[in-house]
Image (spheres, rainbow, N blue to C red):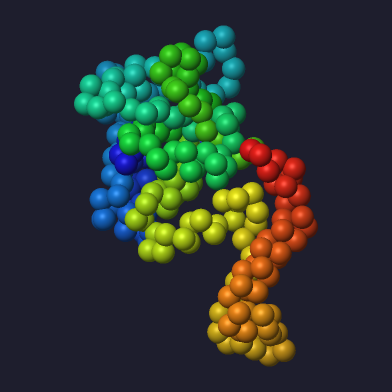
């Protein structure tokens, strides 16, 4: 998979991809992440990328031209499956969306700033809008990181143990069961005895039952939406 990210803060993103599983995925060539500084595409001698909103109002708006130029240059080099704008009013990211995007070949992510971007970019260039939750961040970079992390870890061969991603919370609309490791007893807190019984069938049943009970308790909405 190839991910091209348009941003005003390329080094912030580059540093953030330098850790753990994301770094390993890049080193193993499972994904390539490429950063494009939107300012490099400004025709303005001051490298201006934002301007006042038509009609007035507080806050600046990101201009069309630098973003359009950058995306045009990328599209000349290859076809893209989607051009995604990270925005608080986009479709809310969930595991199903992450699964879908983990199968894509080439995607572009656009990180916005200030009050937002010129609407014509959204109308004519963007093919998908993603939000990471109902709150407003100062810019799209952290949302882009969250989105990338959620999809990159699902690319086959990225996680050491393939089954690890399948047993994640939300993968089947259920919360993952509780996990324990050594020691078997810590003060008076004991590991559930079923987990040390060696009976794999019973352990599997217990985990499933725990998943259902926890989901009912903590996230009953997941059970209501089990078809989504
Ligand atoms: N940009 C600002 N807030 C955001 C959010 N909640 N999700 C995605 N992009 C954003």
Residue in view at x 23 percent, y 21 percent? 76
* 186 or 113: nearer the viewer: 186
* 51 or 20: nearer the viewer: 20
Which residue, as the protein is rendered here, is positioned at the far front? 201
Which residue, as the protein is rendered here, is positioned at the far top? 55
Residue in view at x 56 percent, y 79 percent? 181
Residue 61 vertical placement versus 225 (above, below): above
Residue 127 visible somewhere in the drawing = yes
Q: In x, y percent, where is residue 122? A: 47, 19
Residue 137 visible somewhere in the drawing = no
Residue 128 vertical placement versus 171 (above, below): above
Residue in view at x 51 percent, y 25 percent? 116
Q: In x, y percent, where is residue 132? A: 56, 40
Q: Quadrant of the N terminus?
A: top left
Quadrant hosting residue 96: top right
In-image side of 20 versus 89 (left or right): left
Residue in view at x 75 percent, y 43 percent? 224
* 164 or 29: nearer the viewer: 164
Tag count: 0
Q: In x, y percent, where is residue 92? A: 59, 36
Quadrant hosting residue 94: top right
Which residue, as the protein is rendered here, is positioned at the far left? 77
In-image side of 140 versus 183 (left or right): left
Residue 112 vertical placement versus 68 (above, below): below
Q: Quadrant of the C terminus?
A: top right
């Amino acid at each position: 998979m190839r991910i091209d990210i348009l941003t005003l803060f390329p080094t912030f993103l580059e540093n953030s991809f330098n850790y753990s599983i994301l770094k390993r995925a890049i080193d193993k060539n499972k994904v390539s992440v490429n950063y494009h500084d939107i300012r490099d595409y400004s025709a303005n001698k001051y490298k201006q990328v934002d301007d006042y909103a038509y009609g007035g109002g507080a806050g600046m708006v990101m201009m069309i031209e630098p973003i359009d130029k950058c995306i045009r240059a990328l599209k000349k080099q290859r076809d893209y499956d989607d051009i995604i704008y990270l925005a608080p009013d986009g479709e809310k990211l969930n595991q199903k969306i992450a699964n879908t995007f983990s199968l894509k070949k080439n995607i572009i992510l656009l990180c916005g700033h200030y009050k937002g971007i010129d609407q014509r970019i959204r109308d004519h260039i963007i093919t998908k809008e993603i939000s990471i939750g109902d709150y407003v961040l100062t810019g799209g970079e952290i949302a882009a990181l969250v989105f990338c992390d959620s999809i990159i870890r699902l690319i086959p061969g990225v996680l050491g143990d393939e089954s690890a991603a399948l047993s994640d919370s939300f993968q089947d609309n259920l919360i993952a069961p509780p996990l324990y490791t050594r020691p078997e007893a810590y003060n008076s807190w004991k590991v559930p005895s079923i987990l040390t019984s060696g009976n794999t069938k019973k352990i599997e049943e217990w985990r499933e039952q725990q998943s259902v009970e926890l989901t009912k308790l903590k996230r009953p909405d997941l059970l209501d939406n089990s078809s989504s």
